Image (cartoon, rainbow, N blue to C red):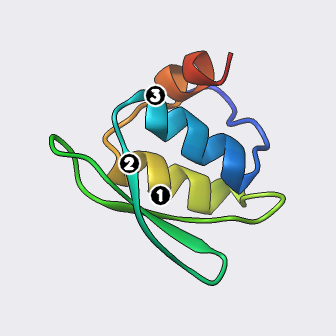
Amino acid sequence: MPKLPIVSGKECVNCLAKLGYTMVRQRGSHVRLSCIKRKPVTVPMHKIIATGLLRKILRDAQLSAEDFITLLK
């Protein structure tokens, strides 16, 4: 497994949007994203998302680290 990059909440939401996720709601600094084919995901809109939290978001989105890195580019 490659090392996960340091990303912000906005970058993470943009990558998930490329997979078909849409923003359902926002409460405070957390955004709830939904997709028809995948589980819903909550992403904090922080400047830096911790590595463990990013790994959990990717697991919920059924996305590998390699695929996430390619979506970032």
Figure quadrant of residue 2: top right
For the residues labelled 2 and 3, the Cα–Cα distance comes to 9 Å
Measured as percent of width and height from the top left, residue 37 is found at: 15, 40
Is 7 on the left or on the right of 34, as rendered? Answer: right
| For discs 2 and 1, the disc positioned in front in the rendered view | 2
Front one among 67 and 8: 8
Disc 2 target residue: 22
For the residues labelled 3 and 1, the Cα–Cα distance comes to 18 Å
Figure quadrant of residue 5: top right
Disc 1 target residue: 56
Measured as percent of width and height from the top left, residue 1 is found at: 55, 28
For the C terminus, the quadrant is: top right
- Residue 4 against residue 46 in the figure, above or below: above
Residue at left 48%, top 21%?
67
Q: Earlier in the sequence, mark 3 or mark 1?
A: 3
SS of the residue under disc 3: helix
Figure quadrant of residue 24: bottom left
Q: Earlier in the sequence, mark 2 or mark 1?
A: 2
Residue at left 59%, top 53%?
54
Is 55 on the left or on the right of 8, as rendered? Answer: left
Disc 3 target residue: 18
Residue at left 76%, top 65%?
46
**Amino acid type, residue under disc 3 in the picture:** Lys
Residue at left 63%, top 84%?
28
SS of the residue under disc 2: strand
The crowding category of the residue bearing disc 1, from other C-alpha atoms within 10 Å (few below 14, some 14 to 19, many at least 20), is few
Measured as percent of width and height from the top left, residue 17 is found at: 46, 37
